[in-house]
Amino acid sequence: MSKINVKDKDISVPGEILAVGMDSFPGIGTYREGENIIAARLGLVQLDGRTIKLIPLSGRYNPKKYDTIIGKVIDVAMSGWRLETNSPYSAMLSMKEATSQFINRGADLTKFYDIDDYVSCKIVQVTSQKLVDVTMKGMGLQKLKGGRIINVSSNKVPRIVGKQGSMVSMIKDATKCNITVGQNGLIWINGPPEGELLAVKSIRKIEEESHLSGLTDKIKEFLEKNKPKFAVDNNDKPEPKTN
Amino acid sequence: MSNELREHIIKLFGSDTRLDGRKLTEYRPVKVETDVTPNAEGSARVTIGQTEIMVGIKVEVMEPYPDTPNEGSIMVGAELLPLSSPNFEQGPPSIQAVELARVVDRGIRESKCLDFKKLCIKEGEKIWMIIVDIVTINDAGNLFDASSLGAIAAMKNMKFPEYKDGKIDYKKKTNKGIDLKDTPLSVTVIKIGDKFIVDPDSDEEQATDARLSVASLSDGTLCAMQKGGDVPLSVEDVEKMVDLGLEKGKELRKLVK
Amino acid sequence: MTYKERVDGRKFDETRKMEAKVGVIPNADGSAYFKIGNTAAYAAVYGPKNLHPKFLQDPSKGILRCNYNMMPFSSSGDRVRPGSSRRSKEISFVTKEALLPVLDLKEYPNSVVDVFIELPQTEAGSRCAGICAASMALADAGLAMKDLVAAVSVGRIDDKLVVDLDYNEESYEDGPVADIPIAMMPNQDKITLLQMDGLVSKDDLKKVLEMGKKVCKDIYEVQKKALKDRYGASK
């Protein structure tokens, strides 16, 4: 019978012996050496039956096919745009994939997306050499106008979105903001000033405390406690939600 | 800089607020600690929000410059360490680092609050050279003001080492420091659109149209200035920025007794 | 001659007091601070990130770059002139070699992980303090690592074998001295940095490496606690 040295939600550091015995299995973030299952990164313990996993608490984004991300235009080329993806690898957005409109050959591409513009897009291909292609043809994929962009650890994105989007919806409602969360850790927030500020603070709180229990209730309480008094101003009416 | 972000910042100014909720003339929390590193003759650590810098002073004995045989000297250096930001690279000082060092230097030198004659050991032969080194630990905007504060705090904290028989014994500190006749401080005022703010964070620095660093003495006399940014300023702009710089200088001075 | 007792009263197998903190530089992907006695080091990790120029890229895995630097006011004597020296270049290189064995960068081809080590104060044992800080910073940055790396100097002063030589011991003049910085993977007992200068017998070397093994395990506990505290494990 294996001796398991850790329990669920423990924090583990590289080199720590998580379990001893051949009937435990090394899951992601761990490796086996002889009888020992050892931590292969800094992470949060997750016991899944006999498998011991370590969930990452930090680490840069690695592009994955089908991820929806927020990219920043860093170059406008002849037939498309190059985007920074908050990872070591840039992505290519070809003219063909940029929009459902038809773009003439020889058109001025900067009229569509210019340097430093942020866009939401979907990864369609990642080669073994990490060449990344993206598309903006799809529901809700668009240039992000106005608002601000913040950068969170991509590992925290699932917690920020919540089960079926429940967490981010809760924040959107309380702050009256449009929020787009990229799998790559970039988040776009646009709404009334007090709302944006509260949205940023709530997201940062989730980032810091994502591995602690009772997070959903804590955030709900936080949003209640800091409920802003929205200025009643026609200019601040939020745009209709697009995703 | 994303035009969208700059427009968004300007829109927020219209509601008298900034990205992080501060008022336009509000500083992030400022903390000044001295005597933070034991091998320096004087030292300080300054944090403004998440910006953090350290300043260390070392002294050397050298021959005076020929045209000032009875005066000591001061040198200010600044290093934008790659450790402190993804935007700083390994290598010789960038123009950003050189400008920072020279602006801090002028704020101190031109204030005339340091009596260089007091740094003379033996006229024509030996003088003290005070070397102020600024290093960045985390750059989250406004390195200018943090550095100016840190340099003065470190200078006030400084004690000369023992100098005997032509040799400095760094391990023995005397209780003699530099007498500063005043406390010159620099405040950087930023113009974005048609509004003025102080203590820019990283996003606001990128959105800067023009900046004016204003160094002043405790009686409100100006002792150094530096304009940056490629957007021109009107005379009225300068007057407004100087007023704001003097007002904030007064507040910051309280932190460096 | 005999080395009767250590200047600061420590036992021969005792290190100076240690302090460690993780997550001290918000801009970095991972960061840490490590202090032992009066020697302190900051380490910041940026990456994996894009690597330029292209000819430096490795298509099979990411590469590691290390830079060790002493701040101008860090030394107990003269000011340290800014910029790299032959000494700092060599230390940067052996530091990289000491950290690389624990890292797995296959998931990030063509990229680079940059480690910057800066020392605000030094009093012997600076390269080891740098390695201790860097190893925590790499873990904080979320990189795949099979172990941490702990480092300390061991050695011989006259007739005694010691760990964690301080400044006075490094410059001891009344008898033979050996200064041996080592870095180890503390859970695998594998050495990743080994340098020596001075005079020591083969048998003494064996003994002092065993002493170093034990100290590295103690350092690992300090590093482990700092990493766990970063994420509120003690809350």
Image (cartoon, coloured by chain):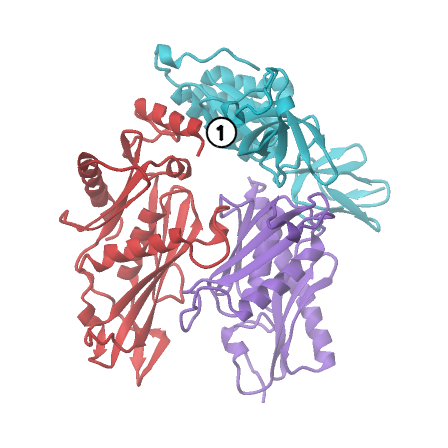
Q: In screen coordinates, is B132 left or right of C63? A: left
On-image quarter of the N terminus of chain A:
top right
Q: Looking at the colours in the rendered structure, which chain would you say is drawn in cyan?
A: A
Residue B30 placement (x, y as % from top left): 33, 44
Chain C: what color? purple
Measured as percent of width and height from the top left, residue A177 is found at: 47, 18
Quadrant location of residue C96?
bottom right
Of residue B223 and residue C164, the one placed in the foreground of this image is B223
Task: List the single residue furthest toward the front.
Answer: A106
Left or right position of B224 against C200: left
Q: Does B172 appear above or below C173?
A: above
Label 1 marks a residue whose chain is A
Residue B143 x/y as whole percent: 36, 47
Towards the viewer: A168 or B116: B116
What chain is the red one? B
Identified at 30% across, 51% down, the residue is B149
Residue C91: image quadrant is: bottom right
- Residue on which disc 1 sits: A149
